[in-house]
Amino acid sequence: MPDISTTLLIVLCLAAAAAGWIDAVVGGGGLLLLPALLLGLPQAHPATVLGTNKAVAIVGTTGAAVTYARKAPVDVKLAVRIGLAAVAGSMGGALLADGISKDAMRPLIMAVLLLVGAFVVFKPAFGTAPAAAPAGRQRVLLAIGLAGLGIGFYDGLIGPGTGTFLVLALTALLHLDLVNASATAKIVNVCTNAGALVMFAYQGRVLWQLAALMAAFNLAGGMVGARMALKKGSGFVRGVLLAVVAALVLKLGFEQFG
């Protein structure tokens, strides 16, 4: 366990719980959890922060995925196919993460968030229609390539927002509603987290004791968030998505320019 105060430890655990809830509802919990770890562990190497983040996130994501799979009509076979590609992508990204600096992370995340927010605002019907018929082979292959390999690589390299990007990609490519896309994204996200975590662990870039404590809170938040998303539907998920994007853009902008 790193040498941090009890107050900071409590803050990190609460951030882990909130991130688990956000991640389960719409993805993007890492956009809360990773900045919290960066602020709480200022002396740690960025790759160590990323590795610890993965060790925390995989627990909450797994809990949310199990909750969704039990209660939502998820195509588990398709999700696993995309997820296997995501494992390869995330391991490749994690292998290159040692070269990423903290200063490079923040503006990149802000730019991507602004694009996500603009897309959702100008497409108000996006993801609110009931899930369509199963996607054809071409769309499935595109989802495997983009949502699996592409977003998986991003998850291993940087990470924050992966769940949100998966939800958007799966909704657009496979014509899912936001609830089913969130459920599918959780299964894929477990795979991206697993691939990246294996590589970070191999490189010795995980603070296991801190991660284990925070993971318990992340799991609780993730399971609560999944149940709320299933109960309240796509409109609720869309509202949370916009609120999360707006809040995080303001927060990162203040840190960058304030």
Image: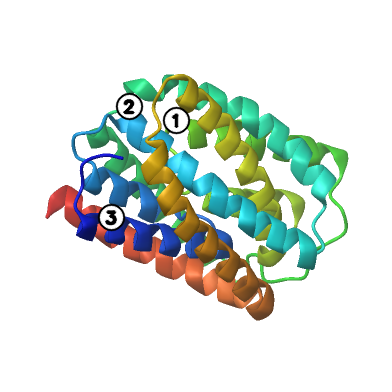
Q: Secondary structure at mark 2?
A: loop
Question: Which residue in the protein does label 1 denote?
Answer: 157
The residue lying at 26 percent from left, 39 percent from top is 2
85 vs 137, left or right, is left
Given the image, on which type of amino acid does mark 2 rest? Ile
Residue 222: x %, y % from top left: 55, 62
* Residue 173 shows in this picture: yes
Number of dots carrying numbers: 3
Q: Quadrant of the N terminus?
A: top left
Q: Residue at x 34, y 31 (%)?
A: 48
Q: Label 2: which residue?
A: 100
Residue 225 pos. (x, y %)? 56, 68
Please state the horizontal and vertical placement of residue 65, each as a whole percent of the image: 67, 55
Residue at 49% over, 70% down: 240
**Is the residue marked by circle 2 packed among few (<14), some (14-19), or many (20+) residues within 10 Å?**
some
Lower position in the chain sequence, tag 1 or tag 2: 2
Q: Residue 73: percent from the left, percent from the top? A: 82, 63
Q: Residues within 10 Å of mark 1 (few under 14, many from 20)?
A: many
Front tag of 3 and 1: 3
Spot the residue most to the bottom.
Answer: 232
Tags 1 and 2 touching, CB below 8 Å: yes
- Looking at the picture, which amino acid does disc 3 mark? Leu
**Which is nearer the eye, 71 or 173?**
71
Q: Nearer the viewer, residue 196 or 220?
A: 220
Residue beneath disc 3: 9
